[in-house]
Amino acid sequence: MAQIKFEGDVTNINERQLEFVNEVIAKQNLQVEKVIFNRMGKAGDNFISDVKRIVVETKDGNLKMIIKTAPAMEVLRSSLNTDLMFKNEHVMYTEVLPKLLALQKEAGVPEAEHLRFAKCYGSLDEAPNEVILLEDLNESDFKMLNKFDPLPENCLRSILKNFAILHSLAFVLKNKEPETYDLFKSKLKNTWEPKYKDPDFDLQFKMFNKVNSQLLDNDSQKEILKNMLTDEGELRESVMIDYQASASISPASDLLFMFFNCTEHETRSKNFIAWIDYYHLELDKSLSYFDLKADDIYPRDQLDADLKKYGKISFAIIILFTNLLMKDSSEAGNLLEALQNGGIKEAMEEMGKRKMNKETAERVRHRIVGLIDSYIQFGLL
């Protein structure tokens, strides 16, 4: 096999990963002239993996891909659950998602209702050299939104429909092919479960509680935070691209994570129930192609019960992500450097020592106050 000429930013990509990239591109049967690697995003946009854009220049035009590579440093891999995260995504892109789409095609589901996911050109599940090559959705006019801004209504409903389709197909597989479902279930691991038993995980939340409490003026909000963290353009469509935390758990977990990470209290307070209604309606619509009904498979009262059941642990996870996602690039870069140098403990010490930027502190405070207000309003505490 001829060695393809690589140019650009290949930092953090090892020889085995480059060898795999070479193999994948060679299989595309293109007359490749060179492959250029470009950095994607800002510091802190991705903590679990290093993400770059690849431009494959050929005699007949360009092919663009996204490459996600795992960190090689053991302290970072251990802190971030890298083995499980990349294993889950490998299984989802190479086995689960193609199977779910095949179920729809076999049932004659209209193409407009098909599960949409990025094409996977190749995935290497070989620790510590994991790498996955995906379709660059920018080429299909998809855009990444600003992580500091809440999702607009049309985007949120599009995501809810995607969730409904994905969840419905999991229910269909469980109903129609239980052995295949159980096989996938055994391969997909809950990435949070090992963390619950890790003493460093408890340390994280104690530190978050200390840092975040300083941002709150209301004593009752401080007490809620303490109690919750000391226990467990015109949109055409949207596409989910990150499946690293995939596991066989309640659909409510996905909904809670999206609602409270991607929207604000003012909007949630007016639309939360309508969003749940819309999701359940789309779930029923997707199930109907397989002669199944949401009222039988996952009735609304069960969904409501699950939202309360998983609300508390979701609160803790959302607080964790709030502290990560609301940082600007310089703060995120400092945190990532601390993770690389000493793992979770050093990163927590870094957070404790450095005062948040004024803008970051306001973003975090606004998110946490809104989270608490929403949890009170919807009875999720």
Image (cartoon, rainbow, N blue to C red):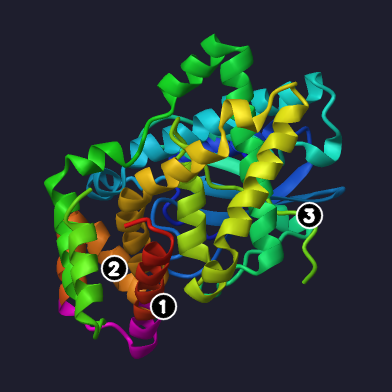
Does residue 369 lie above or below 95 as drawn?
below
Residue depicted at 37% across the width and 85% down the height: 362
Give the number of the disc on residue 140: 3
Residue identified by numbered label 1: 328
Is residue 75 something one can see in this rendering? Answer: yes
Observer-nearest of 320 and 68? 320
Check disc 1: other Cα within 10 Å, few if <14, some if 14-19, many if 20+: some
Q: List x then y, in percent, for residue 305.
A: 43, 42
Residue depicted at 26% across the width and 58% down the height: 340
Does residue 267 lie above or below 184 as drawn?
below
Residue type pointed to by label 3: Ser
- Name the N-terminal-most of marks 1 and 2: 1
Residue depicted at 85% across the width and 36% down the height: 111
Label 2 – label 3 distance at C-alpha: 33 Å
Check disc 3: other Cα within 10 Å, few if <14, some if 14-19, many if 20+: few
Residue type pointed to by label 2: Leu
Residue identified by numbered label 2: 335
**Marker count (numbered):** 3
Q: Which residues are magenta?
A: 353-364
Observer-nearest of 346 and 10? 346
Does residue 206 lie above or below 1 as drawn?
below
Q: Are marks 3 and 1 in contact (CB under 8 Å)?
A: no
The C terminus appears in which quarter of the rendering? Answer: bottom left
Label 3 – label 1 distance at C-alpha: 28 Å
Residue type pointed to by label 1: Asp
| SS of the residue under disc 2 | helix
Does 358 lie within the magenta span? yes
Check disc 2: other Cα within 10 Å, few if <14, some if 14-19, many if 20+: many
Observer-nearest of 192 and 263? 263
Q: Quadrant of residue 53?
A: bottom right
